[in-house]
Image: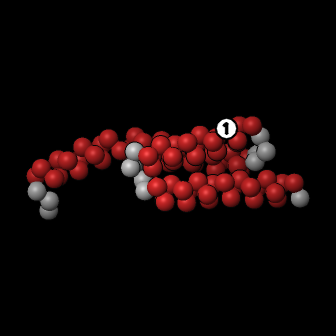
């Protein structure tokens, strides 16, 4: 059990980080759904861009580790590229 002050600090940081983490997760989920629906549309491109931006913001603020954000961005881009390639074929 952490000391009382350490617990309070952790709670404050968690409260501050939660909206940023939630926004990133929601935007990634929206982008993945858009990719599944129609990979070639403008809305999908906008959703993926918004998700990448949200992940980059979360990394810059230290909410997620920079390598974690980079990995998620890479996976999202790969998912989009593969969906677009399979649609063209």
> Would you say residue 66 is visible in this rendering?
yes
- Left or right: where does residue 72 sit relative to residue 35? left
Quarter holding residue 41 = top right
Q: Residue at x 58, y 46 (%)?
A: 52
Q: Residue 9, percent across and down?
A: 20, 47
Q: Position of residue 36 (x, y in %)?
A: 71, 51
The residue at 81%/57% (across/down) is: 85
Q: Residue furthest left?
A: 4
**Toward the viewer: 4 or 77?**
77
Question: In the image, 49: left or right of 67?
Answer: right
Decide which of 27, 56 is in the foreground and name it: 56
Quadrant containing the N terminus is bottom left
Side of 78 relative to 60 (left or right): right
Q: Which element type, helix, strand or loop, lies under badge 1? A: helix
Q: Position of residue 15 (x, y in %)?
A: 30, 42
Q: Quadrant of the C terminus?
A: bottom right
Q: Which residue is mark 1?
A: 46
**Outermost residue toward the right in this view:** 89
Q: Is residue 22 visible?
A: no
Residue drawn at point x = 79 percent, y = 53 percent? 84
Q: Is residue 19 above or below residue 4?
A: above
> In the rendered view, does 7 fall on the left or right side of 45?
left
Q: Position of residue 4 (x, y in %)?
A: 10, 52
Name the residue at 61% across, 57% down. Answer: 74
Colour basis: secondary structure
**Mark 1, other Cα within 10 Å: few <14 / some 14–19 / many ≥20:** few
């Amino acid at each position: 059990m952490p000391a009382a002050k350490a617990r309070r600090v952790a709670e404050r940081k968690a409260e501050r980080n939660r909206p940023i983490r939630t926004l990133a997760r929601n935007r990634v989920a929206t982008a993945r759904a858009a990719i599944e629906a129609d990979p070639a549309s403008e809305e999908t491109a906008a959703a993926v861009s918004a998700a990448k931006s949200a992940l980059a913001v979360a990394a810059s603020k230290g909410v997620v580790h920079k390598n974690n954000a980079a990995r998620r961005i890479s996976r999202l881009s790969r998912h989009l590229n593969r969906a677009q390639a399979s649609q063209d074929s």
